[in-house]
Image: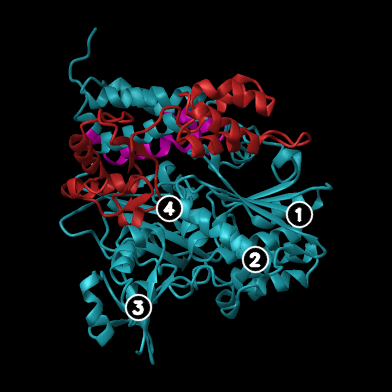
C-alpha cells in the first residue's frame, strides 16, 4: 500500500464499520475498498480485519475467492475480453490474440507504460452482438481483429 | 419546429452495437426527440430506430448516423408488426420490450403492470400459492423446480423474519434475459418479488446481481427508489425493504446456497442440502431464492390466473420460455415462445440459419454445462422432460451454435478449464476432477494423449456426475463427453500413436 492510499482506506473503512449487533459483511467491504482505491492492497488486510472484527485469514479467503477483486493496481485502462461460449463460437479468441499482439502483454499483466491491463472475463451477457471487448466501462460488440487498433486508440 | 419522436433502445447490447453513437451524433438535432426504450431483442437488426406512424411503429435496421434524413422523411422503414422474428413470438414476460421506457412507472401501469400484485393482495397466502400450483410454473434458472412447492415450505415455516432473493447472477455464457429484464422492465421484477414476499410473509428482499452488469444495477436501484417514492413497497401494513447487492465474479454463486453465503459477505461456497434455503436460508431464516426470469413471470400469472399459464406449453413444461439464440447464426437475439417447438424449428425459424460463410457443426443448449447436439439430434422438443430424458439441460435458455471452424478438443478443454477456474472447492470430485480433466485434455491437445486417456476422461466424468455436491461439478462432464461422443474422430486423430512402455 502506498502512502497516498492510507488516509483514503481509513475513510472508506469508517463507512463500512458494522453495526455492533450486525454481522460484518466482508465482501461488501472489500468491494467498497476496491471502488475507492482501484484495488485491495494485501497490506491493507490487517486494518480491514480489525475494523470488521474478523481474522486476517477470513479477509484473505474472501479476497482470493472472487475473481473481480484485485490485489494489484491495473493500468490506466483495463481491457477485458469476453471468454463466454458465444464469443468463442464467434471467434473471440482471434480478437483476444489481436489485442495481445497490439498491446504486447500477457494475460493479467500491465503494459510497461501502464497504459493497459489486459484480462479475460467471464460472459459479459452481450452474446447477441459478440465478440465482446470491455474497455474500462465501455462495452464494445461485434469486434473483429482488424478493429483492434482503432478501438484502443482513444484510450491514452 | 415540428419535432419527431424516435425510439432507440438503451439496452447494454444495443449500446454495444452502436446505439450510443447514434444518440451522440444526433444530440444536437432539435427536430428529433429521442426516447430511450428497452430492446425488442432482435439484436441482429440493431441499431434499430423506430418512429410512430398511424398504422403503428415503423423501424429502420442497422442504422448509422447518416440515415437520419431517410428516417425523418419516412423512407425505407418496415412496420414492426411485420418483422417475422418478432411476429412469430408469444411475448408475455417480454411484452413491453422495445415499447416502453424502462423507468416510466406510469407506462408500466398503463400496459397492465401491477395488476398481478393487486390480484395477489386480494388473495390469502395460501390462495397465491394455490394459483401457482395451478399454473405449474417451474423455476426458470435451470433447476426447474416447481415454484409453488418451494413457496409452500417457506410459507409454512414459522419465523419472525423471512427473505426473498432474486438470483441475478446470470453466469451461464450465452444468456442475458435477466440482464434485459433488469435493464428494460425493472418494475416487473419488483412486482414479482412483492408477490412472493406477500405469499410467504417476507419483509426483506435482495437482488443479487453479478458484477458484470453495471447498467442493470443502476436501473434496478433507480426503479426501487421510484417504487418506494410511489409507496409501492408496502406489504400490507409493514414496509418491504428491497436492496441490490453486487457480486464479485463467481459463477458458482448462481447456486442458491453459494449465493446466500456470498450475500452474507463470505466466500461463495456451496453447502450440502438439506436444509433447503426455503427453511433455513439467509442468516438461518426461511428464504426463497429464484431466478430473475421466474419472478418476472409471476405478475402475468397472478393477473391472468394460473389456469391461463397452464394452458401454454407442453405436459411437463407449462408457459413460455425465454430462449437466447447466439453464436454462428444469422439472427442472434431473444425469443419468447411457449415450450414445445423443436430445437431445429427454433434455430431455423428464429436463428434464420447459419451466418454467411459458415457451416453448422454443433449446438449447445443450457450454458457452459449444457450438452452438445450434432445436426442429427436437432429434432428434440424444447421442454424440460425431453431434455432430461436426453441427459441434457435446458438451463436458463442459452443456445449457442458452433460452426465448422470450431476445434472440438479446444472447446472441450475450455469447458473443463472453466469448471476448474470456477469450482468453489468444497467437494473433491469437482475441485480435483475438473483440474485432472483439464490436464488430460491439454495432453490430448499437445498430441501426447493416449486411448487410455479417453477412457480415463469418461470414468472421471461419471464420478463427477454422481458424486459432486452441486450442478457445477455434476454437469461439467456433459459438454466434454458429448463432444467426444459426437466428434470422437477429432479427439482420436490427436492421440499419440506411440504408447511409451
Disc number placed over residue B227 in the picture, else none: 2
Residue under pointer 3: B50
Chain that appears red: A
Give the secondary structure at mark 2.
Answer: helix
Q: Are marks 3 and 2 on the same chain?
A: yes
What's the residue at 41%, 53% (across, down)?
B398
Residue B380 seen: yes
Identify the residue position indicated by label 1 in the image. Answer: B203
Please report the residue visible at 45 percent of the width from the left and 27 percent of the height from the top.
A71
Q: Chain of mark 1?
A: B
| Chain letter, colour cyan | B
Is residue B63 left or right of A8 when viewed as pictured?
A: left
- Which contiguous range is marked in magenta? B461-490
Q: Residues within 10 Å of mark 1 (few under 14, many from 20)?
A: many
3 or 2: tag closer to the N-terminus: 3
Give the spatial CA distance, label 4 vs label 1: 30 Å
Which of these two is toward me, A153 or B230?
A153
Amino acid at each position: 500500500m502506498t502512502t497516498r492510499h492510507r488516509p483514503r482506506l481509513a475513510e472508506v473503512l469508517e463507512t463500512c464499520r458494522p453495526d455492533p449487533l450486525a454481522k460484518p459483511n466482508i465482501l461488501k467491504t472489500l468491494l467498497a475498498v476496491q471502488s475507492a482505491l482501484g484495488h485491495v492492497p494485501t497490506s491493507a488486510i490487517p486494518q480491514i480485519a480489525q475494523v470488521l472484527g474478523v481474522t486476517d485469514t477470513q479477509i484473505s479467503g474472501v479476497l482470493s475467492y472472487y475473481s473481480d477483486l484485485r490485489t494489484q493496481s491495473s493500468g490506466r485502462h483495463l481491457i477485458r475480453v469476453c471468454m463466454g461460449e458465444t464469443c468463442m463460437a464467434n471467434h473471440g479468441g482471434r480478437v483476444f490474440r489481436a489485442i495481445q499482439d497490439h498491446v504486447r502483454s500477457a494475460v493479467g499483466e500491465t503494459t510497461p507504460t501502464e497504459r493497459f491491463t489486459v484480462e479475460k472475463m467471464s460472459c459479459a451477457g452481450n452474446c447477441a452482438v459478440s465478440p465482446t471487448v470491455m474497455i474500462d466501462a465501455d462495452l464494445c460488440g461485434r469486434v473483429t481483429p482488424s478493429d483492434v487498433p482503432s478501438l484502443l486508440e482513444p484510450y491514452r | 419546429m415540428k419535432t419527431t419522436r424516435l425510439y432507440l433502445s438503451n439496452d447494454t447490447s444495443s449500446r454495444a452495437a452502436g446505439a450510443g453513437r447514434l444518440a451522440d451524433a444526433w444530440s444536437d438535432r432539435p427536430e428529433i426527440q429521442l426516447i430511450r426504450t428497452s430492446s425488442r431483442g432482435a439484436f441482429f437488426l440493431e441499431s434499430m430506430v423506430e418512429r410512430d406512424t398511424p398504422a403503428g411503429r415503423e423501424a429502420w435496421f442497422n442504422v448509422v448516423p447518416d440515415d437520419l434524413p431517410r428516417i425523418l422523411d419516412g423512407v425505407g422503414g418496415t412496420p414492426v408488426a411485420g418483422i417475422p422474428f418478432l411476429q412469430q413470438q408469444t411475448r408475455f414476460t417480454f411484452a413491453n420490450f422495445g415499447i416502453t421506457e424502462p423507468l416510466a412507472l406510469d407506462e408500466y401501469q398503463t400496459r397492465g403492470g401491477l395488476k398481478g400484485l393487486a390480484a395477489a393482495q386480494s388473495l390469502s397466502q395460501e390462495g397465491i400459492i394455490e394459483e401457482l400450483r395451478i399454473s405449474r410454473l417451474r423455476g426458470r434458472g435451470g433447476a426447474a423446480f416447481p415454484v409453488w412447492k418451494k413457496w409452500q415450505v417457506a410459507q409454512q415455516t414459522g419465523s419472525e423474519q423471512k427473505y426473498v432473493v432474486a438470483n441475478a447472477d446470470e453466469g451461464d455464457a450465452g444468456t442475458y434475459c435477466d440482464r434485459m429484464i433488469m435493464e428494460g422492465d425493472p418494475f416487473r421484477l419488483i412486482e414479482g418479488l412483492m408477490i412472493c414476499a406477500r405469499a410467504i410473509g417476507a419483509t426483506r428482499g435482495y437482488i443479487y446481481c453479478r458484477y458484470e452488469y453495471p447498467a442493470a444495477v443502476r436501473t434496478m436501484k433507480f426503479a426501487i427508489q421510484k417504487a418506494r417514492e410511489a409507496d409501492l413497497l408496502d406489504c400490507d401494513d409493514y414496509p418491504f425493504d428491497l436492496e441490490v447487492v453486487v457480486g464479485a465474479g463467481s459463477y458458482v454463486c448462481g447456486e442458491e446456497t453459494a449465493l446466500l453465503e456470498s450475500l452474507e459477505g463470505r466466500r461463495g461456497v456451496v453447502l450440502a442440502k438439506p436444509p433447503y434455503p426455503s427453511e433455513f436460508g439467509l442468516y438461518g431464516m426461511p428464504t426463497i431464492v429464484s431466478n430473475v426470469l421466474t419472478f418476472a413471470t409471476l405478475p402475468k400469472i397472478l393477473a391472468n390466473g394460473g389456469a391461463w399459464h397452464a394452458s401454454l406449453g407442453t405436459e411437463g413444461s407449462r408457459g413460455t420460455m425465454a430462449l437466447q439464440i447466439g453464436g454462428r447464426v444469422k439472427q442472434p437475439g431473444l425469443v419468447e415462445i411457449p415450450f414445445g417447438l423443436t430445437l431445429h424449428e427454433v434455430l431455423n425459424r428464429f436463428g434464420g440459419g447459419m451466418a454467411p460463410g459458415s457451416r453448422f457443426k454443433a449446438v449447445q443448449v443450457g450454458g457452459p454445462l449444457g450438452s452438445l447436439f450434432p445436426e442429427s439430434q436437432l429434432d428434440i422438443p424444447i421442454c424440460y422432460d425431453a431434455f432430461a430424458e436426453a441427459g441434457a439441460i435446458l438451463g436458463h435458455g442459452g443456445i449457442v451454435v458452433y460452426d465448422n471452424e470450431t476445434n472440438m478438443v479446444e472447446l472441450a478443454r475450455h469447458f473443463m478449464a472453466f469448471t476448474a477456474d470456477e469450482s468453489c472447492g468444497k467437494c473433491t470430485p469437482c475441485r480435483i476432477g475438473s483440474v485432472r480433466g483439464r490436464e488430460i485434455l491439454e495432453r490430448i491437445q499437445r498430441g501426447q494423449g493416449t486411448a487410455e486417456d479417453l477412457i480415463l476422461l469418461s470414468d472421471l466424468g461419471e464420478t463427477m456426475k454422481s458424486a459432486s455436491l452441486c450442478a457445477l461439478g455434476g454437469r461439467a462432464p456433459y459438454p466434454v463427453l458429448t463432444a467426444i461422443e459426437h466428434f470422437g474422430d477429432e479427439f482420436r486423430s490427436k492421440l499419440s500413436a506411440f504408447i511409451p512402455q
